[in-house]
Amino acid sequence: MSDAPAATDAGPFEEQRQIYDLLSQETRHLILQFILGHPTHLPSLDELAYMMPKNKAAIRDQLDVLTDNNIIQCYHHPPNEDSRDLPAQFYGLTAHGVDVLHEYNYLRGLPVARALYDNTRLSEKAQRHRDAPRPDLPNHVTNALTIDDGDDTNFDQLAAYIRERKSNTHSVDDQIALAKAFHDAGIGPDDDGVTRTNVLDALDIEIEHQLRTVLDHLVEIDVLDRTTPPGPDVFAISERTDEIVLGRVTEEAEQNLEALIAHIDDELQVTSLEAEAAELNGPDARISAPSVAVADGAGRTIRSILAAEFDIEPERVVERLQSGNPVDRLNTAVNAIESSEEVEKSEAYGQILFVNPAYRYRLTEQATERL
């Protein structure tokens, strides 16, 4: 994926794709989530490194990308520079960054991001950094990131409705507790919602019964919506880069195939053959016969494995990889390599995975009207 900002002469769909790619890359996505969840929305580099399973160099690289695209900027606090224990540089959103996140619905996740941060145990250093003096954010940014807690609405009416409709279920108390947690976190009809795998952590709640069962009961009585997030119905993800590649699936598949072909050509190390290997016995012996490594009795190669997979002569493997649908050829080849215990796949290529977005849950209009 290109880290450059969207071209000024690009059409609206291309610009949207580039911004989506910019925001959705894993490390950058986590950075934005922790900026949103931070109490001051100005974490230091050390705080980000503490919260994220990434090294500082990787985080710094993606901070630079977000800065270059005017999504965030480094805010300096000179009074801290004389202290060895306090950071003087913090990372926060720009006015442009706030507008972009608002347009792409990131700001709806503010309550959940804050709840996740508040329920994370901090180290002594992370706590010291969190409490350090900081500069002020621009007013536009501060106002956009202020969570409106609203009033303390009475929850009794909705609880009574759930108990009335689901009193015959063992999990009714869990259903009420979960609906209350959604309400307290502000995850209502206008929110993007939260995925099932993140519900318990995001809402900081424990229940006795199976979460899927509890959610299903609340959906059944129209207390919770089960929705799919806005955007494509299917995401194409490159296993090589761990990035979404919508709009350039063919290009990414061809790049991976080039790397796979280079690996075939450069392959030097092979392992010893099992006694029952296809190259030595059975009807597949013909397929791998031309392999130099196999002919020498040295072991099985990626070329021979793919020859057996495609049922062709080994010298035609590259030709087969370069013909037909590149995604199908790539995924079939990589799956065959990964299924073998006799060779190792290179990190330079991988499959193109197609993933459906996870369902998300939020309170319904009917539920909020009962509050």
Image (tube, rainbow, N blue to C red):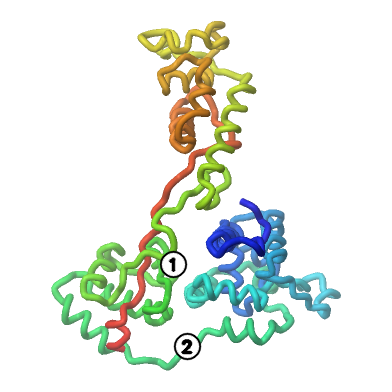
Q: Nearer the viewer, residue 223 or 251?
A: 251
**Percent position of residue 110, x then y:** 51, 76
Task: Report the disc number at residue 295.
Answer: none
**Percent position of residue 8, x then y:** 66, 64
Q: Nearer the viewer, residue 49 or 265?
A: 265
Q: Nearer the viewer, residue 278 or 290?
A: 290
The amino acid marked with disc number 2 is: Asp
Task: Report the disc number at residue 201.
Answer: 1
Which secondary structure, mark 2?
loop
The extreme left residue here reads 168
Q: Which residue is mark 2?
A: 149
Above/below status of 67 relative to 338: below
Task: Please tell me which of labels 2 and 1 falls first in the chain.
Answer: 2
Above/below status of 49 relative to 316: below
Asked if the residue at tag 1 contacts the one at tag 2, i.e. Cβ–Cβ closer than 8 Å, the answer is no
Quadrant where the C terminus sits is bottom left
The amino acid marked with disc number 1 is: Asp
Above/below status of 62 relative to 98: above
Which of the 4 image quarters holds residue 11? bottom right
